[in-house]
Image (tube, grey):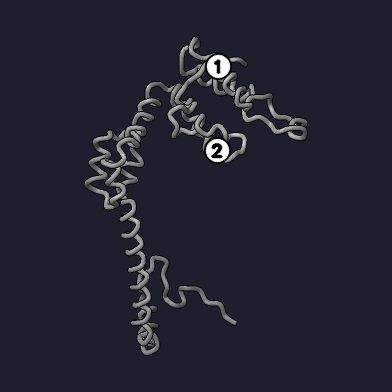
Amino acid sequence: QAVMGHDHLGLRDDMEESLQLQHIFQVAESGWTTYLPTLLGVHNEYRLRLIKSFDDANCILGNGFWYYVYNNQNLPREALERYLLNFEGNPMLKSLCTEHTAALNFLYKRMDYVRLHPAMQLWYTFWDDFYFQNKDMTVLQSYDSDFNPRSGKSVCYCVMKRDVLEEWLEERKLLGTKPSVLMNLTCSPYLFHDGILSSLYGRLAKLTNSDHVEVRV
């Protein structure tokens, strides 16, 4: 049994047609020309499916959305509405400007809030991530509106001093001591403890005046 390399057939790494490959095609022409129309038909159907899939996806959300909207957190509201009305084909996206003004108002107010100060950006990011990482936990089901960023009274919009936050967490039975093996065996660990809060308030202290936050190490 002989094993021949691709160069035996005249195949090149740059995929250019070589003289050797041309010769092979000429010799075997009667064999492959019969199947060529079928092969081209299969390839054309494949390309048409890709084109349709691309067009269908653009009818839901245009490719331009990712560049002009998604990747531009500083996009003014007027520019957003202009883009949605003039460049998006999905009627639901176009209707955001007229039928969902309250949602856009809420979105931009949230953005205005976190831009007020770097400490607010950190505070919002911390609680936003906490909520979406833990929102399915049973212990949080009764306090969804307290943590859900979609709620106007969520903690992510209210920067608190440490003692105020600790009292707030204790009221919801979410504050305890640092987890240990013994605790895990005897009771459910708490979501917040001194180590987490010290880390949060330590970073806040670097972003704002010390009289606005309390850092207890």
Labels in figure, total: 2
Three-letter code for the amino acid on which mark 1 is drawn: Val
Q: Please give the name of the residue rendered at 55% of the width and 23% of the height, measured from the top-left corner.
A: 200
Drawn side of residue 103 relative to residue 136, left or right:
left
Pointer 2 or 1: first along the chain: 2
Task: Determine the residue positioned at 42% across, 23% down.
Answer: 118
Q: Nearer the viewer, residue 114 or 10?
A: 114
Rate crowding at label 2 as few (under 14), some (14 to 19) or many (20 or more) other CA atoms within 10 Å.
Answer: some
Q: Secondary structure at mark 2?
A: loop
**165 lies above or below 101:** above
Residue ID at (52%, 21%): 203
- Residue 43 relative to residue 82: left or right: right
**Could you tell me residue 197's position as x and y percent?**
59, 22
Seen as rendered, the residue at the extreme bottom is 30
Label 1: state its secondary structure: helix
The amino acid type found where label 2 is placed reads: Lys
**Disc 2/disc 1 C-alpha distance (Å):** 23 Å
Q: Which mark is residue 195?
A: none
Residue identified by numbered label 2: 135
Q: Is residue 215 left or right of residue 45?
A: right
Q: Nearer the viewer, residue 158 or 30?
A: 158
The spot of residue 164 in percent (x, y) is 55, 16
Residue 187 in view in this figure:
yes
| Quarter of the image with the C terminus in it | top right
Tell me, yes or no, if residue 23 can be seen here. no
Give the labeled residue for mark 1: 164
> In the rendered image, which quarter is residue 25 located in?
bottom left
The quadrant the N terminus occupies is bottom right
